[in-house]
Structure formats: C-alpha cells, structure tokens
Image (tube, helix red, strand yellow):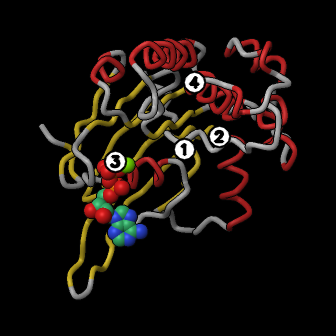
Amino acid sequence: MNKEIVISATDLVKAYRRGSEEVRAVDGISFEAGPGELTAIIGPSGSGKTTLLNMIGCLDNPTSGTLRVGGAQIFGGRRELSETELTRIRREMFGYVFQKFYLIPTLTVEENIMLPGAFYRSPAAKSPHEVMRLLGIERRARHLPGELSGGEMQRVAIARALINGPKVVLADEPTGSLDSRRTGEIKEILRDLSGQGITVVMVTHNLELARSADRVLEIRDGKIHG
Ligand SMILES: Nc1ncnc2c1ncn2[C@@H]1O[C@H](COP(=O)(O)OP(=O)(O)O)[C@@H](O)[C@H]1O
Ligand SMILES: [Mg+2]
C-alpha cells in the first residue's frame, strides 16, 4: 500500500560559514510524516532542531537535500519554486507555533487570531469562533494578551496557527515558557490536532511532551542519533 506522506525530507543539510570554517547546523537528516502523525524533535541546545523545523516549514531553504510537502516538491527539485508559490504553501499548508507566542499586545485575542486570515484566506480557512471554541478560549475573545495567563497565550497562538486550516502544525518549544500543568494542556491540544488528521512536528525539551509523540527524532550535532 502506498502510505500517504505529508512531509518527506531527504538528506537535508543547512550549512553556515563561520569565518573560514563551515558549520553544518543540520547535517543530512531524512524523515517522513503522514497525516495525523505527531513527531517530537529532541536534542541538546544548538543541535539543529530549530534549523530543521524552519526548513520543514519552508521558512528557511536547505543548502542541499530535498523536501516534499503534501506531494509537492519544495526544495531540491528540478525547478525552483518562486517566492509567490512558497508563500502560498506556507499559508495553506502550515500553522506555526513558537515558544514566545508572538501575540500583538494592542490587539484582542480574536483580532490576533484573525490576523493571518486578514492577509490571506485559504480555501480551508476556519472562523475565529471555530478555532477559539476548539482551544477553549471563546470567553477571552475580547481580552488583550496582557490579561491572559501563559497557557492561555499559547492557546491563542495555536488558534491563530489553525485559522487557515493547515495540514501541518509546527511548534518550536511550545511549552518552553509554561509550567507543568499548562504543558499538560498543550500536550492534550497537540494530540487532539493530530487526532483530527493534522501532522504535528514539535521541538521540545519536555519529556512528557516527547513521550506523547508517535515518533521521537533525537538530534545531536545536526544528525539523527541512534
Ligand atoms: N543564521 C545562522 N548563522 C550561523 N549559524 C547559525 C545560524 N542559525 C543557527 N546557527 C547555528 O546552527 C546550530 C544549530 O542551531 P539551532 O537550529 O538554533 O539549534 P537548536 O534549535 O537545536 O538549539 C547552532 O550551532 C547555531 O549557532
Ligand atoms: Mg531552537
């Protein structure tokens, strides 16, 4: 059977020049993820986790290697994608969640969530109410981010990531700023998303979060370990 693959990365490399030496932040990583699969990327600080996640999310281009997302060749194909095509893929395929939430302090919860949809409406776009209900934050719709707890802020950030109906959610240390109870809540939310068929790839230092994943990629010095 031909298993459906959402993300397929082959031999991804990201190299930087540091003076005269070349530093390989990501040094030949391959991995695949199907619909609804939850992958955790773990590893020490500086091992290349963020660089890998950014390449998977088409936010950063690899030095070499290939990346396919939803069957489309993104990097390493015969033809380079235009910036317009890349932008469309970022908007339609991905929802991004970061450790530092990046909410706009002068906009309400609902306005923050609507923001990506204000620039672009994906065919799969959801309503702000739908995603707020999903994340249990409807009561906070008219509040400002400064009035929320850290756990609520991260739920707003996840709601915002879902507004365009992504197939893939990428989260870089989503619980890095949260206590253990809030971490547990975010873990359940990410599991729910994967239960709905969304492919989730998260970077985490949290063992509980990593244990909830279908697959764990341990990275050391830019390579998959073990
Ligand atoms: N823009 C950059 N220029 C040069 N080196 C970088 C750049 N981004 C990351 N690196 C280096 O790549 C390595 C991996 O970084 P990163 O992916 O952020 O690691 P992690 O997320 O696992 O902490 C580190 O050594 C870092 O210093
Ligand atoms: Mg990082």
Q: Which amino acid does label 2 sit on?
A: Met
Q: Which amino acid does label 4 sit on?
A: Ile
Residue 98 visible in the picture: yes
Q: What residue type is labelled 1?
A: Val
For the point 52% across and 67% down, which residue is it?
A: 78
Secondary structure state at the residue bearing disc 2: helix
- The residue labelled by disc 1 is 69
Nearer-N-terminus badge (4/1):
1
Nearer-N-terminus badge (3/1):
3
Q: Where on the image, by quarter, is ligand 1?
A: bottom left
Instruction: State the quadrant of the N terminus.
Output: top left
Q: Do the residues labelled 2 and 1 touch (CB within 8 Å)?
A: yes
In the image shown, does 82 or 196 lie closer to the viewer?
Answer: 196
Q: Are marks 4 and 3 in contact (CB under 8 Å)?
A: no
The nearer-to-camera label among 3 and 1 is 3
- Compared across the picture, whether 45 is left or right of 170 comes to left
Spatial separation of the CA atoms under disc 4 and disc 3: 20 Å
In the image shown, does 161 or 215 lie closer to the viewer?
Answer: 161
The circle on residue 198 is: 4
The nearer-to-camera label among 3 and 2 is 3
